[in-house]
């Protein structure tokens, strides 16, 4: 399965639409029957065709204010609701776990203002399982970039029917540092009442590059002592945050990897690691 990221640019006010349209074009459905009360409800049967992946998303912050579309603020939000049944046309649907808390989905790693007319660059990889997006603010702003990963990783090692295995990881304002947020437990573990966190498992090279000038890219796994390793965050790689800059290119034969050194804003799901994604024509 390919993980080459494509590159685009748009106004900050258009980023939410880029995300929504990218999901829909990849095979997700927006099942919301009332955009005012239910916002966007993204649903997919996954790459395998037998899942019921679902999450809710909106362009506003945790208090449902300050839209990233119409204002200069930078916080959208989402929540892992586990299930959703649409209502009749124009009527609110039924949300599974309606008390599930909303989580930050930052389009820029800052609590300050960034004009909605700012041109942002993004790098994106999306399929029927998940969306990974890197959003870069202009270098003149000094705030850096953010990476958001939402959905079901393409490689899982537990029995996770429906939307149990759907995860959210971010480099800005994560719930807990060095942890992913996951919708529920696997089937052989008692069901959770709300989304919970699982530690990231990554073994970074003690020196990058090594004495031969080679950069070692490490894979991110997640799990805990009760469940073991549940999955791998496919499509991204970790490396120590030293001797690299944001935008550095690491070449491995015919493959090129773009290095992301994210902006700092509160907790980071990936800890202190820099992140590499595969690109072409950088």
Image (cartoon, helix red, strand yellow):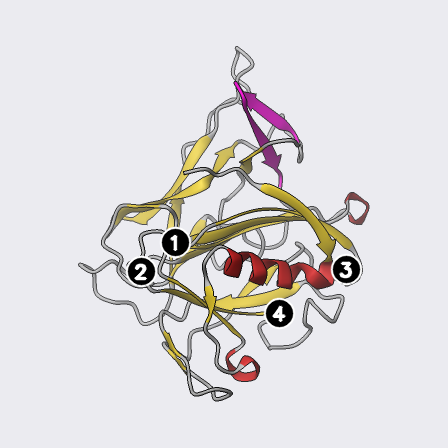
Could you give the CA–CA distance between mark 3 and mark 2, rounded to whole angstroms? 38 Å
Tell me which label, 1 or 2, sits earlier in the chain: 2
Instruction: Between label 1 and label 3, give the one nearer the viewer.
Output: 1
Image spot of residue 61 (x, y percent)? 61, 71
Circle nearer the N terminus (3, 4): 4
Helix or strand or loop: what does disc 3 sit on? loop
Q: Is residue 12 above or below residue 205?
A: below
Pick the front one: 234 or 170 = 234
Query: Which residue carries the number 3 mark?
Result: 114
The image quadrant where one finds the C terminus is: top right
Residue 171 locus on image (x, y percent): 56, 50
Q: Earlier in the sequence, mark 4 or mark 2?
A: 2
Disc 4 or 1, which lies upstream in sequence?
4
The residue tagged 1 is 152
Whether the residues at callouts 4 and 1 have beta carbons within 8 Å, the answer is no
- Mark 1 / mark 3, whichever is N-terminal: 3
For image coordinates 25% across by 67% down, the residue present is 191
Q: Which residue is mark 4?
A: 59
**What range of the chain is rendered magenta?**
248-261
Query: Decide: marks 1, 2 in contact (CB < 8 A)?
Result: yes
Q: Nearer the viewer, mark 3 or mark 4?
A: 4
SS class, disc 4:
loop
């Amino acid at each position: 399965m390919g993980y080459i990221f494509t590159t685009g640019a748009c106004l900050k006010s258009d980023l939410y639409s880029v995300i929504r349209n990218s999901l829909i074009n990849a095979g997700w459905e927006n099942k919301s029957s009332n955009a005012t009360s239910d916002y966007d409800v993204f649903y997919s049967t996954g790459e395998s065709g037998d899942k019921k992946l679902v999450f809710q998303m909106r362009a506003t912050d945790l208090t449902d204010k300050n839209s990233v579309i119409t204002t200069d603020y930078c916080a959208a939000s989402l929540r892992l609701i586990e299930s959703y049944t649409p209502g009749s046309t124009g009527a609110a649907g039924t949300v599974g776990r309606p008390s599930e808390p909303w989580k930050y989905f930052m389009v820029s790693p800052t609590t300050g203002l960034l004009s909605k007319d700012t041109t942002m660059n993004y790098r994106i990889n999306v399929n029927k399982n998940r969306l990974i997006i890197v959003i870069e603010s202009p270098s003149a702003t000094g705030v850096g970039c953010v990476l958001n990963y939402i959905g079901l990783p393409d490689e899982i090692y537990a029995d996770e029917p429906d939307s149990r295995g759907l995860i959210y990881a971010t480099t800005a304002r994560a719930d807990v540092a060095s942890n992913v947020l996951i919708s529920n437990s696997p089937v052989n573990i008692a069901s959770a009442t709300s989304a919970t966190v699982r530690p990231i498992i990554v073994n970074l090279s003690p020196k990058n590059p090594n004495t031969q000038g080679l950069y070692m890219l490490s894979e991110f796994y997640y799990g805990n002592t009760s469940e073991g390793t549940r999955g791998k965050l496919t499509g991204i790689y970790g490396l120590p945050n030293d001797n690299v800059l944001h935008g550095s290119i690491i070449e491995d034969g015919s493959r090129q990897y773009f290095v992301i050194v994210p902006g700092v804003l509160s907790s980071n799901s990936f800890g202190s690691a820099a992140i590499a994604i595969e690109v072409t024509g950088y």
